[in-house]
Image: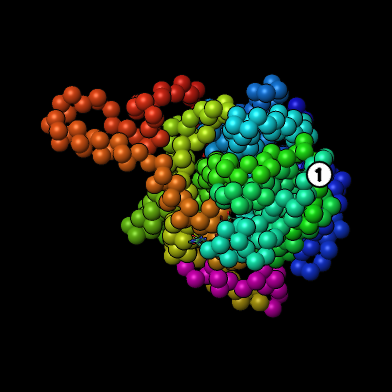
Amino acid sequence: MNLMTSQDYCESLREYNPTVYVRGDRVESVADHPQLAPGVNAIGMTYDFARLTEHREYALAEQHTSGRTVNRFVHINRDTEDLLSKLEYVRALCQLTGCAMRYLTMDGLNALYQSTYQIDSTHNTEYSSRLIEQMHRIQDNDLTVGIAMTDAKGDRSLRPNEQPKPDSHVRIVARRPDGIEISGVKAIVTAAPYVHELFVLPGRNMQREDKDFAVACQVPIDAQGLTIIARPAGRPGDAAAQFSSRFGQSTGVCVFENVFVPYDRVYMCGEWEHSEHLTKTYANHHRHTCIGARAGFGDLLIGASAMMIETNGLDMEAEPHLREAMVELIKTVESFYACGVSASVYGKTTDAGNYEPDAVYSNLGKLLLAHSIYDMHRIANSVSGGLIVALPHPEEDHNPDTMDKLDTLMSASADMPPHRRAAVARLIEDLTASHSGAWYSVISVHGGGSPEALKKEIFRNYPIGDKTDLVERLIERGLHKDSPGITPQPGQCCDTGCEPPRQTTLPKRERLH
Ligand SMILES: Cc1cc2nc3c(=O)[nH]c(=O)nc-3n(C[C@H](O)[C@H](O)[C@H](O)COP(=O)(O)OP(=O)(O)OC[C@H]3O[C@@H](n4cnc5c(N)ncnc54)[C@H](O)[C@@H]3O)c2cc1C
């Protein structure tokens, strides 16, 4: 078991020399650049968290292909318990960091595990064994791998091969005896500057004419020909940003120019008919993960809103409209989280042997959070009052000319000292009304796929036919007569009929959050 600390992780980043630009400057060392520090801190947390004895039950897992204990974020899921532990682990980390990103590595590995198995089964290829070898290397070195899936896309009404600029989608530009060369632009890659490697995955279904765009592979972050043009992570250096000056994520545009990838890191090379399966499988795993992530963010909003009510001198138990607002917030967060739990319980073992969340529930949970993120912000804002965006900057906290004059503004509840009132107000601003707050809104809407993509998957996977059969049976035979006794639930549809939900024998578990 090799579990790095956050310091080891930083040190490991210094061994790479990626081409990264932030705000127009070439970054010398991503581990030491202040504009990227909140992102490095957030991923660093995934390393330190897993080493704490109290978190090991959730944060570590046994990799079945090697028998070795690994960080869950580089693990292949095998059962319901794995998915529930993942949800808890992601939620707990996002309470601390907002977004810790590293779970994307796990989603990518699980999707590739299924996809390589499927391609090998039809094409007699050896992608699966390549992936397992690389996965063991990732696990043994405790690496973080980013996901480069979303292409620049160009004109959305055109297919990849029809684009006036072929680089709008990453594609194979040369096939060599020892590997391939890829070129093109991936538009949005979370944490790109400070991961060790990237999984480059196709972002959509492909047709025969798009064959060269059907490519999945793995590249080190400092591969020759790869340029990353990134935004700062969070709000570095902003004293008012109590949370996102310490934790936040950068996103990077990844430009590939004739990047060479040896065949032992290539997992799809023109098998265009499997592109859709890989994209959808990744999306399903990742949407399930997004649910845990945004629940952790929701926990922060619930706690901060309750404290803000208290600092205003109000008792939410005694004020029906405030109590109602808090219940609304709780209902929202726990409803989409419950979909994540259902997706775990109704998940299924795939042909490849790993375990996939139920697609209806994972897409529903992600859709619910995409729609309700603005309501979550609205409720936190409405119970807090305007102070959250009106409070002067922290420089005034210690300015002898102004600090006393602000004392009246900051004095509300006798039980809450002014500095705590300021801290909570600034936290709510940071999470909901700053550009980092907006980042959490947009990632909730688009991260893991836009709402339309989620709706398509819900419609595609939901057993509507079973429901019409049910009604037909009722109409033909009268109420309940000769009924098989089971009303199929989402995710329980199968070729031979429908099965009741599997009995889980989950050990009694404590909630981590
Ligand atoms: C903060 C953040 C982090 C992210 N991190 C990652 C990451 O780490 N890795 C990664 O690969 N991706 C990442 N993404 C990308 C994310 O998956 C995409 O944003 C999402 O899939 C939507 O794609 P898009 O942004 O290109 O929007 P578009 O696809 O352009 O969608 C915009 C709108 O147009 C509609 N639309 C698009 N195409 C069509 C069409 N052909 N016909 C009709 N309507 C259409 C959509 O439904 C949507 O309403 C991240 C996104 C965000 C915001």
- Can residue 309 be seen here? no
**253 over 350 or under it: above or below:** below
Coordinates of residue 154 in the picture (x, y in percent): 61, 64
Please tell me in which quadrant of the rendered image residue 2 appears: top right
Coordinates of residue 132 in the picture (x, y in percent): 70, 30
Coordinates of residue 230 in the picture (x, y in percent): 73, 61
Q: Is residue 236 left or right of residue 470?
A: right
**488 over 394 or under it: above or below:** above
What sort of colour scheme is used for the picture? rainbow
What SS does tag 1 mark?
strand
Coordinates of residue 316 in the picture (x, y in percent): 40, 55
Of the 4 image quadrants, the one containing the N terminus is top right
Q: Is residue 463 left or right of residue 214?
A: left
Q: Residue furthest left?
A: 478
Magenta residues, start to end: 385-401
Which residue is labeled 1 in the image?
176
Residue found 54% across the figure and 57% down from its top: 446
- Whether the magenta-drawn stretch holds residue 389 is answered as yes
- Other residues around mark 1 within 10 Å, as few (<14) / some (14–19) / many (≥20): few
* Total numbered labels placed on residues in the image: 1
Q: Nearer the viewer, residue 201 or 210?
A: 210
- Whether the magenta-drawn stretch holds residue 165 is answered as no
**33 over 13 or under it: above or below:** below
Residue found 74% across the figure and 55% down from its top: 183
Q: Nearer the viewer, residue 214 or 101?
A: 214
- Can residue 356 be seen here? yes
Please tell me in which quadrant of the rendered image residue 22 appears: bottom right
Which amino acid is tagged 1?
Arg
Q: Nearer the viewer, residue 251 or 240?
A: 251
Q: Residue furthest front?
A: 209
